[in-house]
């Protein structure tokens, strides 16, 4: 286990260095992640019934979005198209370490470069968080990070079959925006959309940790949210492993 | 190894039909390829473009899973890619010698290899020092990969692949694009590494200089099947059963037309092509009949041999099809 952790740490370090030369591209990624929550903020901040915490909620959504953003369609899928994955396959380490390390490195950069935006929005909306609420949100944020990686990585594996992987991942992104709590906080969605959104994994990827951080959830709802997140983490984990096995079998038999 | 590739006729209608009903064709990239390589051998794996060299090499390295057949390397099934197998092999592609991020320095990449292959610090330092000396790496260790020339990349790529002392090297066009000096450094290094460590080397290359200087045994593949497997000189005798006699005669009126095929004549200098078996007798005849100022018997270059081999294989294929 310690070797795996060392390899993950090393991969993050390598990728942090590798991405250091692409700060301008990272800025565009940050903007891309922040646009939908900002639009939601502008709309719901001026709706009287949205609640006092809506500003804090959307600030938390922006933070969660930056810390869980996944771009395996740009990174992992590209390695399939370019053939670089062949070299990765011959490294004596679990194949997920490469995409995972790159994912975490990009998130680190996005959080770092996104600090001015987070500060600006926080000051503008007068956001406030209680330390206890933030503490309650930390595990949910970790699960959200894992979920979103598994979701996007699985979608990006479509590159084993098609060259149109960006369309596949973009569709997944739209679902996260609509049902994840970016277009509207889950509590403000009309029924039955709200119930559907609560059951699907997208809220666990974005809105659930933000709701916990903003302190808008009752303990029972928080517990239910954690249960749903745990279920989807296991389910998407199985999906990722299954898709990897199918994809790599296709890759290694159809040609590299 | 058979690929199934989609095919369709040209035109809009054919494209529309293909949306509903796709048609496929089987492409046999490699078939009936059987060979064994003993530990420590350096073998040239040759063939025309598309002959199946790289596909075979990828199967042996573990990247490709063959559709049928049996492959064992170091007693392992390559495509299972067990860690203990991957630690014993290295695949080096001349077209892409370093797979690492271009922002990293060469030393960063070495450190990564150290962790990846669990190399103890003392062993790592020893190996790095040795490789640096052999490949003259000191000046490039602190440089970013993106700033390296092709030759420097190849040297760094070789060293990165060998710092964990693999037992088997798969070299795919290791000198492609390199200038003469850089190619010579790479060739010399591969020969020394193999001799010192007893590593087995399978080399594909279109550079006959690589093959000539490294490989005593050649495997020639054509259309995914083995066309020749044996010593380099045997390949010459099969595909180029001739020798060249270069003669300079003292007499301006000497006529060597009956001694062999005249390939070239420049004043008193003649270049003749003769049957390999008849070369000693013809040489003796020339020496006895003419006033010879200079005479040499030459083997045809490996490049010519390969060219003749490819031409003959192509003719055979045309006839059979």
Image (tube, rainbow, N blue to C red):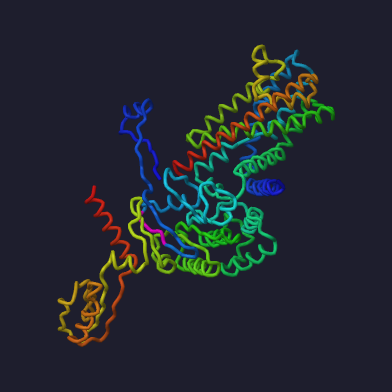
Q: Nearer the viewer, residue B304 or A211?
A: B304
Quadrant of residue B293 within the rendered picture: bottom left
Q: Residue at x 37, y 48 (%)?
A: B31
**Left or right: where does residue A11 sit relative to residue B204?**
right
Q: Nearer the viewer, residue B299 or A34?
A: B299
Magenta span main SS: strand
Give how far across and how far down residue A227 sits, in percent.
Answer: 72, 24
Image quadrant containing the N terminus of chain B: top left
Where is A36 relative to B51, above or below? above
Q: Nearer the viewer, residue B250 or B229?
A: B229
Q: Residue furthest top?
A: A191
Give how far across and how far down residue B93 sits, in percent.
Answer: 49, 55
Give how far across and how far down residue A188 sits, in percent.
Answer: 71, 15
Where is B177 relative to A14, above or below? below
Q: How many marks?
A: 0
Asked if residue B47 lies in the magenta stretch, the reply is yes
Q: Residue furthest right?
A: A131
Q: Residue at x 42, y 43 (%)?
A: B67
Quadrant of residue A148 within the rendered picture: top right
Q: Residue at x 31, y 67 (%)?
A: B236
In the image, the segment drawn in magenta is: B44-48
Quadrant of residue B37 within the rendered picture: bottom left
Asked if residue B207 lies in the magenta stretch, the reply is no
Give how far across and how far down residue B294 sits, in percent.
Answer: 27, 84
């Amino acid at each position: 286990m310690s070797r795996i952790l060392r390899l993950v740490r090393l991969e993050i370090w390598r990728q942090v260095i590798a991405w250091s030369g692409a700060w301008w591209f990272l800025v565009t990624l940050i903007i891309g992640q922040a646009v939908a929550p900002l639009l939601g903020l502008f709309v719901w901040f001026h709706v009287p019934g949205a609640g006092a915490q809506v500003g804090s909620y959307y600030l938390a959504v922006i933070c969660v979005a930056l810390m869980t953003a996944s771009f395996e369609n740009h990174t992992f899928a590209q390695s399939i198209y370019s053939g670089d994955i062949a070299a990765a396959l011959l490294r004596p380490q679990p194949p997920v370490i490469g995409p995972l390390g790159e994912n975490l490195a990009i998130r680190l950069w996005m959080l770092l470069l996104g600090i001015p935006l987070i500060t600006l929005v926080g000051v503008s909306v007068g956001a406030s968080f209680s330390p206890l609420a933030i503490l309650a949100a930390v595990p949910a944020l970790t699960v959200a990070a894992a979920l979103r990686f598994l979701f996007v990585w699985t979608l990006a594996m479509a590159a084993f079959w098609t060259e149109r992987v960006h369309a596949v991942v973009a569709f997944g992104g739209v679902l996260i925006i609509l049902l994840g709590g970016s277009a509207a906080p889950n509590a403000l969605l009309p029924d039955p959309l709200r119930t559907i959104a609560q059951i699907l994994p997208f809220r666990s990827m974005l809105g659930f940790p933000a709701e916990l951080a903003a302190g808008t959830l009752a303990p029972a709802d928080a517990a239910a949210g954690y249960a749903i997140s745990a279920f989807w983490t296991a389910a998407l984990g199985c999906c990722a492993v299954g898709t990897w096995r199918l994809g790599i079998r296709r890759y290694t038999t159809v040609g590299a | 190894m058979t690929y199934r590739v989609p095919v369709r006729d040209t035109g809009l209608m054919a494209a529309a039909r293909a949306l509903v009903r796709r048609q496929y064709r089987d492409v046999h990239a490699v078939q009936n390829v059987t060979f064994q390589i003993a530990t420590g051998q350096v073998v040239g794996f040759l063939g025309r473009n598309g002959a199946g060299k790289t596909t075979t090499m990828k199967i042996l390295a573990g990247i490709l899973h063959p559709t049928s057949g049996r492959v064992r390397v170091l007693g392992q099934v390559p495509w299972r890619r067990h860690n203990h197998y991957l630690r014993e092999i290295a695949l080096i592609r001349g077209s892409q010698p370093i797979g690492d991020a271009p922002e990293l320095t060469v030393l960063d990449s070495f450190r990564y290899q150290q962790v990846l292959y669990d190399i103890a610090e003392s062993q790592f330092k020893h190996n790095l020092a040795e490789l640096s000396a052999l490949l003259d790496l000191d000046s490039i260790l602190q440089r970013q990969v993106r700033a390296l020339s092709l030759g420097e990349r190849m040297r760094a790529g070789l060293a990165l692949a060998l710092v964990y002392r693999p037992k088997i090297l798969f070299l795919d066009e290791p000198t492609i694009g390199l200038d003469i000096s850089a190619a010579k450094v790479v060739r010399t290094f591969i020969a020394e590494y193999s001799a010192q460590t007893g590593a087995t080397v399978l080399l594909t290359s279109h550079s006959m200089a690589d093959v000539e200087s490294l490989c005593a045994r050649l495997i020639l593949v054509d259309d995914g099947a083995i066309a020749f497997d044996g010593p380099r000189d045997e390949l010459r005798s099969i595909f180029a059963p001739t020798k060249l006699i270069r003669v300079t005669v003292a007499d301006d009126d000497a006529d060597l037309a009956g001694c062999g095929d005249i390939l070239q004549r420049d004043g008193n200098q003649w270049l003749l092509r003769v049957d390999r078996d008849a070369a000693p007798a013809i040489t003796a005849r020339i020496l006895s009949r003419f006033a010879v100022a200079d005479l040499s018997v030459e083997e045809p270059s490996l490049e010519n041999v390969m060219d003749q081999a490819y031409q003959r294989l192509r003719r055979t294929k045309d006839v059979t099809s």
